[in-house]
Amino acid sequence: MVPRSMAPLTYRPLREQDFAEVLAVNERAFDDLVGRELPRPTLEAAYGRYRRLLDTDPGGAWVAEREGAVAGAAFALLREGLWGLSLLVVDPPAQSAGAGRELLRLAWEHGNGARGHVILSSTDPRAMRAYARLGLDAHPCLAARGAPRVAAPPEVRAGGPADLPLTEAVDRAVRGAAHGGDIATMLDTGAELLVLPERAYAVVSGGRVRMCAAHDEESAGTILRGALARIADAGEEAEVEWLSARQQWAIRVCVEAGLRLDADEGCVFTGGDVGPFSPYLPSGAYL
């Protein structure tokens, strides 16, 4: 009998019944990368993300399988001509067997004809090398973490579904494509929307700034302060990710709020027409 580690890998489209195995692979892969157990997303948030992408982009949702068990997965999305890689994970025992390479190829093909491409990469050197080989530009990133000390700007308010047209207008200005229902899915699975009317928005969840975008840097700084103040009011530690060199406005706000800067975030990879991509902090799930 061939050991499971040596059995051939096969590839097929994702099915909803794969969600539990994909989540388990995701957790094992990232725990293995950093050498410790990371905070877990809620099942509601993880499954909401998977279901959203399977509904909107079935052609970009793939799994690698070995003897009937999920050994890896990739999710890619297309939004108004902008392609993004939402997830690429391989179970540690299946790594170095070509699963990541093939899953990336399948996900990349979902973006045939896309005007722009975005990938948010972990610090895994194999992943970063693979994304660079696609011809994408690398933008190394910082992260900001800690207990924020910042006053809530009075002009920032809680948002909701009625504010989605604002998010779409801002998205098209900073990245050339709206998230649309992606943000609605985030709200449905526990995230909170904050808005600076007519100018900016941010999505926060579990102490993390999941997304932040604005028409201008002054407005972006205001909405980010509002997001950090909301996190502080909840008594949570804050985490702001994907602070590339394009987002100096965000780095300044985070430093002023007393957060520490960590050079362990990975890279934003972009190619083609992705708009100015600033002032903008992308979402790991929806780019």
Image (tube, helix red, strand yellow):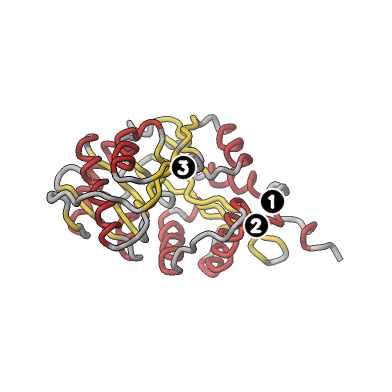
Q: Secondary structure at mark 2?
A: loop
Q: Amino acid at mark 1?
A: Gln
Q: Residue at x 59, y 51 (%)?
A: 34
Q: Is residue 179 above or below residue 7?
A: above
Quadrant containing the N terminus is bottom right
Residue under pointer 2: 91
Judged left or right of residue 36, residue 275 is left
Q: CA distance from mark 3 to mark 1?
A: 27 Å
Decide which of tag 3 and tag 1 comes sooner along the chain. Answer: 1
Q: Determine crowd level at label 1: few under 14, some 14-19, many 20+ residues with C-alpha closer than 10 A.
A: some
Judged left or right of residue 13, residue 283 is left
Location of residue 66 by image quarter: bottom right
Q: CA distance from mark 2 to mark 3?
A: 27 Å
Residue toward you, 167 or 106? 167
Decide which of tag 2 and tag 3 comes sooner along the chain. Answer: 2
Q: Determine crowd level at label 3: few under 14, some 14-19, many 20+ residues with C-alpha closer than 10 A.
A: few
Residue 109 pos. (x, y %):
54, 42
